[in-house]
Amino acid sequence: MFSGSIPALVTPFRDGTFDEGAFRRLVDWQIEQGSKALVPCGTTGEASTLSNAEHHRVIEVCIEQAAGRVPVIAGCGSNDTRNALLHMNFSKKAGAAAGLCVAPYYNRPSQAGLIAHFSFLAESSDLPIVLYNVPGRTVTDLEDETVVELVTKYPDRIVAIKDASGDLSRVADHRMGIGREFCQLSGNDELWLPHSAAGGKGCISVTANVAPALCAEFHEAIAANELQKARELNDRLFPLHYAMFSDASPAPAKYALSRVMEGFTDEVRLPIVPASEASRKAVDAALAHAGLV
């Protein structure tokens, strides 16, 4: 269903509020540079510090500005199942192609709780679901058996997974367990190449915020089985992948965007603070290495 370079978009702020104009320019730039889908209101979009009204406005603007040129996978995750459903219902009405639903954080549900959570969402909304597993942030891990059970139970509703577990063996585990073609997307930029080799279809990427054309070209090389070119592009991008996490995300990504997009600020929302001096130096060096500045 989804493939290629898919940026997990930052949410630009100016003077503490959503900078709609900057976001519209970001959406246009991403599409022009070859991004194949867009993800507003994910982790990189600081969804955890957006009010529901802000959350929905960001999704609405993204869909409106994309204007059908690429699909929008709206961030719909919450550690409150009914609030996740609220996001899904809004996103469906607004025209999203799918909802990105992270495993509930902080509550630490059991695997039975995760199955109940995603089953409730699948049965209560007809918006396709992209599972999002990022145990480094949520503590809760969507185990392979749980993913297989959910996809088998709801084959037309749960259509993909963004896996940021860092465990590449899961790509094969999911393929073997599900027994059919299933859209697996990397949630780790630095693992994009081996994840694709194992059967992944692309990456929901932080780096693509800053280097959309390079990331799109990188995926195209992978898809064409041009391994030498893919390696060369991976080498150009690799320092940037790590620089994006040289301080609490998305502060480094926003600083990087302020370097490559005119009028884009590096403003973040507490408890995230602007990138440190060391982080900015790492980003500057990585941008130069990639040939972006």
Image (cartoon, rainbow, N blue to C red):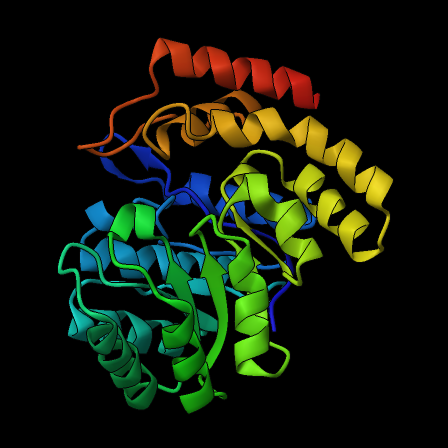
User: At which x and y percent is residue 253?
Assistant: 45, 31
200 on left or right of 140? right
Front residue of 268/289: it is 289
Q: Which residue is depicted at the point 20% across and 59% down?
A: 52
Q: Is residue 67 visible?
A: no
In this view, 285 is above or below 11: above
Counting every numbered tag in the picture gives 0
Front residue of 211/188: it is 188
Q: Classify the position of the C terminus by image quarter.
A: top right
Q: Which residue is depicted at the point 25% across and 72% down?
A: 111
Q: Classify the position of the N terminus by image quarter.
A: bottom right
User: At which x and y percent is residue 265?
Assistant: 39, 26
User: At which x and y percent is residue 196?
Assistant: 67, 55
Q: Which residue is depicted at the point 61% across and 63% down?
A: 70
In this view, 127 is above or below 66: below
Q: Is residue 152 visible?
A: yes
User: At which x and y percent is residue 212?
Assistant: 63, 41
172 on left or right of 271? right
